Image: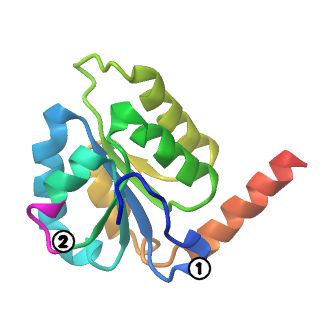
């Protein structure tokens, strides 16, 4: 797929959890290790990732990853759009709280959208493990519908 092109169907049409993966440079190795450890679970998901994170994961996993643009070049904004459209079930974002990011505004917007649209977000390995090991994780349909209904009511 061409980098940065969003062509997947709406998540409500997909029978699998849709997981977005993002990691700042200082946390990419941790993300790679976490994804490798959870490869079996992630292989049953549709994965989206910002470009550099996705390339890191593709190099060590046998799981297809849909690539967005690099975070600073618009990938965070693309992911925010996917969240707003109801196309993401879970976000795993290993962000670096100790390093200033040139695209910090985009990072904050992404975190804000995940909270606004009631999308679970994990910011470290422990919370990511809790999310994907939940018995609710493999059946996201009811939560997609609830989020969509809630968001439609908020617009009216």
Residue 104 horizontal/vertical position (percent): 40, 22
Quadrant in which the N terminus is drawn: bottom left
Identify the main secondary structure in magenta: loop
**Quadrant in the picture for residue 60:** bottom left
Q: Is residue 102 left or right of residue 146?
A: left
Compared to 24, does 5 lie above or below? below
Q: Residue at x 28, y 24 (%)?
A: 97
Quadrant for residue 73, please give it: top left
Residue 50: percent from the left, percent from the top? Answer: 33, 47
Where is mark 1, residue-wise? 13
Relative to 126, residue 58 above or below: below
Q: CA distance from mark 2 to mark 1?
A: 23 Å
Number of numbered discs on residues = 2
**Residue 130 pos. (x, y %):** 32, 59
- Residue farthest to the bottom, as pictured: 15
Which of 107 and 126 lies nearest the eye of the viewer?
107
**Residue 65 locus on image (x, y percent):** 29, 65
Q: Is residue 118 visible?
A: no
Determine the secondary structure under disc 1: helix
Q: Earlier in the sequence, mark 2 or mark 1?
A: 1
Residue under the point 29% across and 34% down: 95
Type of colouring = rainbow
User: Can residue 55 be seen here?
Assistant: yes
Magenta-span inclusion, residue 61: yes
Quadrant in the picture for residue 40 = bottom left
- The residue labelled by disc 2 is 39
Start-end of magenta stretch: 58-62
Which residue sits furthest front? 2
Q: Is residue 130 left or right of residue 141?
A: left
Residue at x 61%, y 67% (from the top left corner): 143
């Amino acid at each position: 797929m061409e980098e940065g092109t969003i062509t997947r169907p709406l998540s409500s049409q997909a029978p699998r959890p849709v997981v977005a993966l993002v990691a700042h440079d200082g946390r990419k190795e941790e993300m790679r290790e976490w994804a490798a450890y959870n490869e079996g679970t992630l292989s049953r998901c549709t994965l989206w990732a910002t470009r550099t994170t996705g390339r890191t994961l593709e190099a060590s996993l046998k799981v297809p990853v849909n690539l967005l643009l690099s975070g600073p070049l618009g990938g965070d904004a693309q992911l925010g759009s996917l969240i707003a459209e109801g196309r993401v079930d879970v976000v795993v974002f290993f962000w670096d709280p100790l390093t200033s990011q040139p695209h910090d505004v985009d990072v904050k917007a992404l975190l804000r959208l995940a909270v606004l649209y009631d999308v679970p977000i994990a910011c470290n390995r422990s919370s990511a493990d809790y999310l994907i090991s939940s018995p609710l994780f493999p059946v996201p349909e009811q939560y997609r519908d609830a989020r969509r209904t809630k968001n439609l009511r908020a617009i009216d």
